Amino acid sequence: DLNNYCYFLIASNGLCRGGTVSDGVYSDLFRTNKSDIIIRHFESNKMSVIRNDGRVKFILNGNEVSSYEHIAHQGDKVGMFMEGKRALVFKNLKIRQKTHLK
């Protein structure tokens, strides 16, 4: 659903941003223009988005960048977005949905 999702963005210039879109309205949860956490110059960065105990954590290169209370969106899709003439390369992409069995 292009009108309802959570996002986590990094750029090689140091921009680090995350938030939600609900009914097409953006809401930044965090934003920094010059993050020293981002590894630049076409090197690898490790990004994680983890939901646990009702909270969503954004982790970049082992550092928790932000966390917030989980906001439910319908659907079970994951997407990637890129601008300009760039390459998005994954060395180790893991997408898991944990189910709780009782």
Image: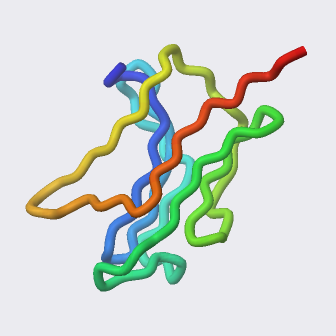
- Relative depth, front residue between 65 and 76: 76
> What residue is drawn where x is 43% and y is 26%?
77
Q: Residue at x 69, y 43 (%)?
A: 68
Image quadrant containing the C terminus: top right
In the picture as drawn, the residue positioned furthest to the right comes out as 102
Q: In this view, does 75 lie to the left or right of 99?
A: left
Residue 23: quarter of image: top left
Work out which quarter of the rendered image holds the N terminus and state it.
top left
* Quarter residue 25 falls in: top left
Camera-nearest residue between 23 and 96? 96
Measured as percent of width and height from the top left, residue 79 is found at 35, 36
Place of residue 30 in the rendered image (x, y in percent of width and height, measured from the top left):
55, 55
Q: Is residue 94 above or below residue 42?
A: above
Relative to 69, does residue 66 appear above or below in the rendering? below
- Counting from the top left corner in percent of width and height, residue 49 is at 59, 48
x and y percentages locating residue 81 in the rendered image = 27, 46
Please state which of residues 79 and 100 is positioned toward the viewer in this rendering.
100
Residue drawn 46% across and 58% down?
A: 92
